[in-house]
């Protein structure tokens, strides 16, 4: 856990260093405090996901659609609220997705997933990005498979019946603990950055 936090702090510190050391670029980047806030909010979101799913490890009954509403839906709703409250676009993405809405939305997102696949120690990073024709900055954060995830994302034949019935195009199975499940993304549009810069200097 300390190693993960250290890597995240280092990532944010490097971005802050760039903003301070290169003032000409600063207006095209989120404020350092917003970078840190986005990282922390995603850590909170992942902790929420992990905590809600933890009880599945000891469950005696197979997961149902109601289980999904109690475990998965709150995470999605929290991502929506973070987007609304902060002017961000917060999403979950994966190559092996169950919900088609979680398919990578840009070539950059596909490259980010490939980067996580190649570097199993990488927890998160920032990069310039373009989304729906809009420029901005995007944070990518790994989601790793935990033991509780296997109740719904283990072997293809072991998936709960409601998953087989409701997701005929499902790709999110045959995972093992420690595998890359997917990633969270936070897109901060350049327009928002420019407005905040103008307010701070007025």
Image (cartoon, helix red, strand yellow):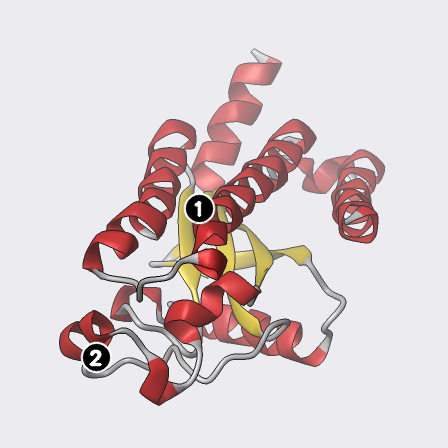
The image shows residue 19 at horizontal and vertical percentages of: 75, 38
Q: Nearer the viewer, residue 78 or 174?
A: 174
- The reply, left or right, for residue 35 in relation to residue 135 is right
- The reply, left or right, for residue 109 in relation to residue 144 is left
According to the image, label 1 marks what residue? 52
The image shows residue 3 at horizontal and vertical percentages of: 83, 52
Is residue 130 depicted above or below 14 in this figure? below
Q: Is residue 38 visible?
A: yes
Q: Residue furthest left?
A: 165
Which residue shows up at 49% across the image and 60% down it?
57
The image shows residue 61 at horizontal and vertical percentages of: 31, 63
- The reply, left or right, for residue 19 in relation to residue 146 is right
Label 2 vs label 1: CA separation?
22 Å
Is residue 23 depicted above or below 166 in this figure? above
Classify residue 132 by image quadrant. bottom left
According to the image, label 2 marks what residue? 164
Q: Quadrant of the C terminus?
A: top right
Q: Nearer the viewer, residue 91 or 72?
A: 72
Q: Residue furthest top?
A: 202
Q: Residues within 10 Å of mark 1 (few under 14, many from 20)?
A: some
Q: Earlier in the sequence, mark 2 or mark 1?
A: 1
The image shows residue 48 at horizontal and vertical percentages of: 49, 42
> Which structural element holds mark 1?
helix
> Which structural element holds mark 2?
helix
Which residue shows up at 66% across the image and 28% down it?
33
């Amino acid at each position: 856990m300390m190693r993960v936090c250290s890597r995240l702090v280092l990532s944010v510190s490097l971005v802050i260093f760039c903003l301070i050391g290169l003032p000409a670029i600063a207006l095209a980047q989120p404020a350092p405090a917003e970078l840190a806030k986005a990282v922390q909010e995603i850590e909170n979101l992942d902790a929420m996901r992990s905590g809600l799913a933890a009880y599945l490890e000891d469950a005696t009954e197979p997961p149902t659609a109601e289980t999904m509403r109690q475990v998965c839906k709150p995470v999605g709703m929290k991502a929506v609220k973070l987007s609304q409250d902060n002017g961000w676009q917060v999403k979950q993405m994966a190559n092996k997705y169950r919900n088609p809405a979680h398919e990578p939305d840009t070539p950059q997102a596909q490259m980010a997933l490939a980067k996580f696949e190649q570097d199993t120690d990488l927890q998160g990073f920032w990069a310039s990005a373009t989304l729906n024709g809009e420029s901005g900055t995007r944070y990518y954060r790994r989601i790793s498979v935990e033991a509780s995830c296997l109740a719904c994302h283990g072997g293809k034949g072991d998936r709960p019946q409601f998953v087989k019935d409701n997701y005929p195009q499902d790709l999110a199975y045959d995972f093992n603990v420690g595998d890359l499940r997917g990633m969270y993304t936070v897109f901060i549009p350049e327009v928002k950055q420019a407005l905040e810069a103008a307010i701070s200097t007025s």
